[in-house]
Image: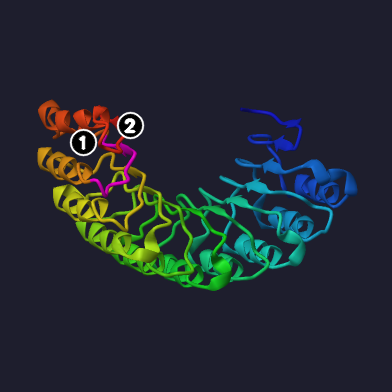
Amino acid sequence: MSGGSILGGLSWLRYCNLTDKSCSYLASALKTSCSSNLRVLHLSSNNLLEPGVELLCSALCHQNCKLEELQLQYCDLTNKSCSYLASALKTSCSSNLRVLHLSHNKLLDSGVKFLCSALCHQNCTLVELQLYECDLTDKSCSYLASALKKSHSSNLRVLNLSQNMLLDSGVERVCSALCHQNCKLEELQLYKCDLTDRSCSYLASALKTSRSSNLRVLNLSLNNLLDSGVKRLCSALCHPNCKLKELQLRWCDLTDKGCSYLASALKSPSSNLRQLDLRANHQMSASAVEPLCALVKDSHCNLEKLVTD
């Protein structure tokens, strides 16, 4: 959508050629008692830069601001913006902000470090953090894992780290948090993160622990997992402690063997998986997918939706 609109508690201002000056006007409005109905603000694809975010954060800290969702994708932001946001999220009046989208900005690991200082703060009630394509590495995973283990970070439910070069070492660090009693993460997006079958080994171990039962959605698409990775994941899918309901494995170089592992795991009465996405695994034959299709129709199997080519 181009242009801007305001409807109810939502303001949609994507692709509006806005600058930091617009943020000054918005911040002033958000501080007034009349702005209390505004809950969602979309400012994506505008050249806001750091000064714009700094101005918005002055509003987030204000008692009259009731904003719950802030979208800042493609806004030419850097790690400095994360510093301003982290400070705002730590204030007692910022507790209304639940969803923060910062994807497609060059935040770097240093920016995530700032955000993590807020995630572990008692005043931060963020439940969803989107960091898709932010030039992150496995170091960011280390900061996030540490934050997710803190007692006050329990509000975070959705974390998107897709299209960042996290590598297997990054997933290993995130998995150390998934096993922790204070981590309440329910959805983890790791699309195109340069992962291999080794990451599946770490994830499988985490999913088998009794404390990892909160994870419901896992996206591992466009990673070089291979059949060996799926085999490791399947050891978790049929484990009684695993509560995963949705698994996305698009473009993962899987073959008929991978299908066989999945079919065997999903037949287990312990499997809770409801949705499975296997699109763009072009080495899978129709005959190999058939047993999985049969499971969707089987009343004794929990699988409800299977997506293939």
Percent coordinates x, y for residue 189 in the rendering: 41, 50
Nearer the observer: mark 2 or 1; the answer is: 2
What is the residue that sits farthest to the right in this orientation? 33
Percent coordinates x, y for residue 103 in the rendering: 52, 49
Check the image and report above or below for 14 versus 198.
above
User: What is the number of the mark on residue 238?
Assistant: none
- The residue drawn where x is 36% and y is 45% is 245
Label 2 amino acid? Lys
Q: Please, what secondary structure does the residue beneath circle 2 have?
A: strand
Residue 203's image quarter? bottom left
Q: Nearer the viewer, residue 13 or 270?
A: 270
Percent coordinates x, y for residue 132 in the rendering: 46, 50
- In the image, residue 271 lies in the stretch drawn in magenta: yes
Q: Is residue 204 left or right of residue 52?
A: left
Residue 262's image quarter? top left
Q: CA distance from mark 2 to mark 1?
A: 17 Å
The residue wearing badge 1 is 281
Q: Is residue 141 left or right of residue 255?
A: right
Q: Main secondary structure of the magenta part?
A: loop
Q: Nearer the viewer, residue 215 or 34?
A: 215
- The residue drawn where x is 17% and y is 40% is 263
- The residue drawn where x is 49% and y is 62% is 108
**Quadrant of the frame with the C terminus:** top left
Label 1 amino acid? Asn
Coloring scheme of the render?
A: rainbow
**Quadrant of the frame with the N terminus:** top right
Image label count: 2
Q: Is residue 119 left or right of residue 291?
A: right
Check the image and report above or below for 297 versus 138.
above
Q: Which residues are magenta?
A: 269-278
**Are there few (<14), some (14-19), or many (20+) residues within 10 Å of tag 1?**
many
The residue wearing badge 2 is 305
